Amino acid sequence: MSTRGRHLPFRSGNLAVDRYIAESYDTVRGMSSRFAATICGHVIRRQSEHGIKGHIAEIGTFEGRFFIAMALGLAPGEHALGIDTFDWPNAGLLDLFHSHCARLGLPRERYTAIKANVRRLTAADIRRALGEHVLGGQVRFWHIDGDHSREALTADLALAEATLHPQGMICLDDMLHPGYPLLVVAVHEWLERHPDWRVLAVIDREDIVAAAKFLICHKDVVALFEQDLMTTFKAQHWVLGSEWERYFCVVLTPQPRIAEVD
Ligand SMILES: C[S@@+](CC[C@H](N)C(=O)[O-])C[C@H]1O[C@@H](n2cnc3c(N)ncnc32)[C@H](O)[C@@H]1O
């Protein structure tokens, strides 16, 4: 069912991002939910308010559905980087991506597309593509949505970490997806090796093709966003939280409810 132009009960607070999500999101094929795009748009806006400057980057850009939502939230001087093999379902994908960007208010000078297998890219390549001299080539928000294998996610996390602003955020797609049950194992192993990192929030699914995402960041960054997410998205806050053994994190879901017990 098309939801184009419908009134959504949640907002990122950035007009351009919210207009795109409400009016044009359906016109760009993709696999990320409006809900997750809204929450991430909000986080990107709050990063700017906290003075966290940097670029946004995505592994697995496809037609650009989520990429455009993130990029429309950038501040002046910041750049967006999309990485994809751009070869599926056919060789026309890159042109289609560029045409969506142009149509939806993202001029070429605001973003770069790298058509490559991300495994062939190094942190230096990412910094170079973003212009090392601009904001140190640092990324403040990464979306990882490429190859959905455990090994690839581990490598993608290493690349993201190596180029991340110290107060930056990494968003991981398709967490807890029934089709990719072991991705969360890679995340858990990575978090065990990074005891100073936390899951800030679990953004719940809308459906099987618009699945859950995790937001992860350094533990010192959590306080900048945690209470704000619970307050801003009060109507979508699942108050029981998500248990990570040493701490609980925020859970946001389009329609929170708790099982009824008589
Ligand atoms: C699930 S789609 C991304 C959906 C998109 N992020 C969205 O939210 O609509 C996954 C994308 O990852 C890309 N991909 C998979 N493995 C890759 C790799 N090793 N290097 C670059 N891109 C890759 C695929 O080409 C595909 O376009």
Image: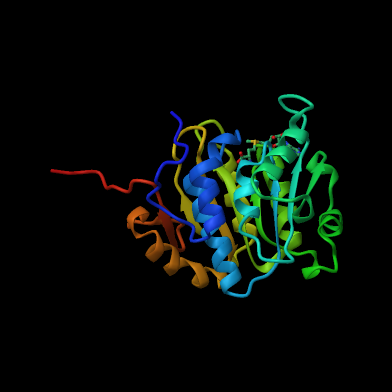
Task: Write down the quadrant of residue 132 in the picture.
Answer: bottom right
- Residue in view at x 61 percent, y 41 percent: 65
Disc tally is 0
Could you tell whether 185 is left or right of 258 in the image? right
**Position of the N terminus by quadrant:** top left
Could you tell whether 218 is left or right of 106 in the image? left
Farthest left residue? 262
**Position of the C terminus by quadrant:** top left
Q: Nearer the viewer, residue 198 or 106?
A: 106
Q: Nearer the viewer, residue 246 or 163?
A: 163
Q: Is residue 196 above or below residue 103?
A: below
Residue 41 position, x and y percent, is: 55, 56
Residue 217 position, x and y percent, is: 59, 63
Residue 245 position, x and y percent, is: 45, 58
Q: Nearer the viewer, residue 119 or 87?
A: 87
Residue 213 appears anywhere in the view: no
On the rendering, which quadrant does ligand 1 occupy? top right
Farthest top residue? 90
- Residue in view at x 50 percent, y 67 percent: 225
Q: How is the image coloured?
A: rainbow
- Residue in view at x 52 percent, y 50 percent: 19
Residue 70 appears anywhere in the view: yes
Q: Is residue 191 above or below residue 5?
A: below
Could you tell whether 50 is left or right of 231 in the image? right
Q: Nearer the viewer, residue 228 or 161?
A: 228
Could you tell whether 37 is left or right of 117 in the image? left
Residue 195 position, x and y percent, is: 60, 64
- Residue in view at x 86 percent, y 54 percent: 125
